[in-house]
Image (spheres, rainbow, N blue to C red):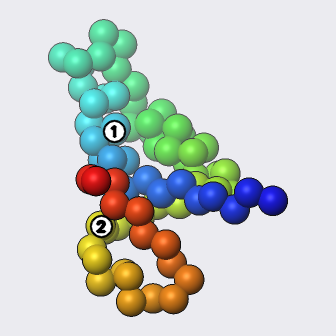
Amino acid sequence: MNRTVHGIPWVVVLAVTRLLTHASICGNPLSPAQVRGIVVHWLSFAHVRTIASNDRGFDRFAGIKRINPLA
């Protein structure tokens, strides 16, 4: 069984919200409620989680594999 978990940083959720609701960027911008629905849908999948940080301090916890998204 594949136990890969995909993490979405909160800053990405905020950026997606900002971009998809901005009239100058999207010809047909979504409402904040519509974007929230999209994000809630993403998070409804068992393998998707929100993450807060790329802080190396998380390396001290056994069982957590941190993948640097900036590398």
Q: Amino acid at mark 2?
A: Asn
Q: Residues within 10 Å of mark 1 (few under 14, many from 20)?
A: many
Q: Distance between the Cα atoms at labels 2 and 1?
A: 21 Å
Q: Residue at x 59, y 59 (%)?
A: 5
Q: Considering depth in this image, is 67 or 10 the residue closer to the camera?
A: 67
Q: Are marks 2 and 1 in contact (CB under 8 Å)?
A: no
The image shows residue 62, relative to residue 16, as above or below, that is: below
Q: Position of residue 21 (x, y in %)?
A: 31, 29
| Mark closer to the chain start, 2 or 1 | 1
- How many badges with numbers are in the image? 2
Q: Residue at x 56, y 83 (%)?
A: 63
Q: Residue at x 63, y 58 (%)?
A: 4
Mark nearest the camera among 2 and 1 is: 2
Residue 2 sits in which quadrant?
Answer: bottom right
State the residue lying farthest toward the left: 24
Instruction: Report whether 56 appears left or right of 35.
Output: left
Disc 2 target residue? 54
What is the quadrant of the N terminus in the image?
bottom right
Disc 1 target residue? 17
Q: Considering depth in this image, is 12 or 70 the residue closer to the camera?
A: 70
Label 2 SS: loop
The image shows residue 66, relative to residue 18, as above or below, that is: below
Q: Residue at x 30, y 68 (%)?
A: 53
Q: Amino acid at mark 1?
A: Thr
Q: Residues within 10 Å of mark 2 (few under 14, many from 20)?
A: few
Label 1 SS: helix
Q: Position of residue 40 (x, y in %)?
A: 55, 48
State the residue lying farthest toward the front: 71
Q: Position of residue 34 (x, y in %)?
A: 48, 33
Instruction: Report whether 1 appears left or right of 55.
Output: right
Q: Position of residue 68 (x, y in %)?
A: 34, 61
Residue 7 is marked as: none
